């Protein structure tokens, strides 16, 4: 009698690396004919192997939840490449759910990605080139299968996971620098908020001083 493929392997853990995120670029002189009149960029959101290998041996489908303003905003991709290409003008959060092959007997995994369309992190006065405007916002992660089923363990060990290519040979850029750039962007936004708060505080003080003057004159 064949062993149960649903039996789990106690104390065993196996992982697979993925990259997910988006690439984007402005239309330029040639607009896609189907693009909304307000749209300015073409973008693609995806889940991939770090070296572009086929992930369908363990991923059954990927569901991308776009902004509600998009027709059919929930996009289900059941075969590689696990990606969605669209046009747009604004940045928003995209929900990503990864579903695994039935042999895994695993729940889906949820990820979230903030769509990036506009370049940032350049010094003041820098003149953006066309290359600068081609945005890559990509993150590295690992999907870990703790105590996988016997069948899933067999599937995963038949196809070794990819290693990250050496720095400089990556097709996509995902590095500590990208994390630092994102932190810099958040800090710049916070600095602007603080600056605006201080401006409003100063304005409030001026109004209060004017009110006190009026009260003094009328006494």
Image (cartoon, grey):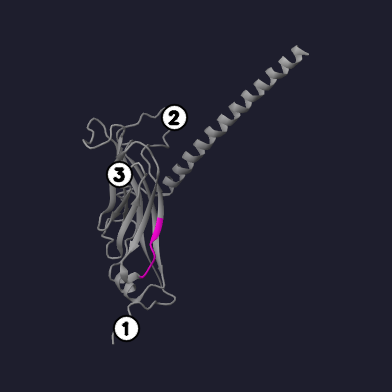
Residue at figure coordinates x 32%, y 83% from the top left: 3
Residue 4 lies, in percent from the top left, at 33, 81
Q: Which residues are magenta?
A: 105-110
Q: Residue at x 25, y 54 (%)?
A: 81
Q: Which residue is mark 3?
A: 71
Q: Residue furthest bottom?
A: 1
Q: Residue at x 69, y 19 (%)?
A: 211
Residue at x-position 28% and y-position 43%: 86
Tell me: residue 94, above or below residue 17: above
The reply to whether callout 1 and callout 3 are in contact (CB within 8 Å) is no
- Ranked by sequence position, the earlier of labels 2 and 3 is 3
Position of the N terminus, as image quadrant, is: bottom left
Q: Is residue 149 visible?
A: yes
Observer-side mark, 2 or 3, equals 3
**Sequence order check: which comes first, mark 1 or mark 3?**
1
Q: Main secondary structure of the magenta part?
A: loop
The location of residue 214, given as percent across then percent down, is 71, 15
Mark 2–mark 1 Cα distance, whole angstroms, equals: 65 Å
Q: Quadrant of residue 195?
A: top right
Q: Which residue is mark 1?
A: 3
């Amino acid at each position: 009698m064949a062993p149960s493929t649903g039996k789990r392997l106690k104390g065993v853990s196996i992982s697979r690396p993925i990259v997910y995120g988006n690439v984007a670029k402005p239309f330029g002189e040639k607009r896609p004919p189907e693009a909304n009149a307000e749209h300015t960029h073409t973008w693609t959101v995806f889940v991939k192997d770090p070296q572009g290998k086929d992930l369908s041996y363990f991923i059954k489908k990927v569901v991308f939840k776009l902004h509600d303003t998009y027709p059919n905003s929930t996009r289900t991709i059941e075969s590689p490449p696990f990606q969605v290409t669209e046009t747009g003008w604004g940045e928003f959060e995209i929900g990503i759910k990864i579903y695994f092959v039935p042999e895994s007997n695993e729940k889906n995994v949820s990820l979230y990605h903030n769509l990036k369309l506009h370049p940032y992190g350049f010094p003041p006065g820098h003149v953006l080139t066309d290359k600068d405007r081609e945005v890559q916002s990509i993150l590295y992660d690992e999907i870990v299968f703790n105590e996988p089923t016997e069948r899933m363990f067999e599937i995963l060990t038949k196809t070794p996971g990819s290693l990250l290519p050496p720095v400089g040979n990556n097709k996509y850029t995902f590095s500590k620098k990208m994390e630092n750039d994102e932190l810099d962007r958040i800090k710049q936004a916070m600095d602007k908020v603080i600056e605006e708060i201080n401006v409003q505080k100063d304005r409030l003080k001026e109004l209060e001083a004017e009110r006190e003057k009026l009260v003094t004159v009328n006494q």
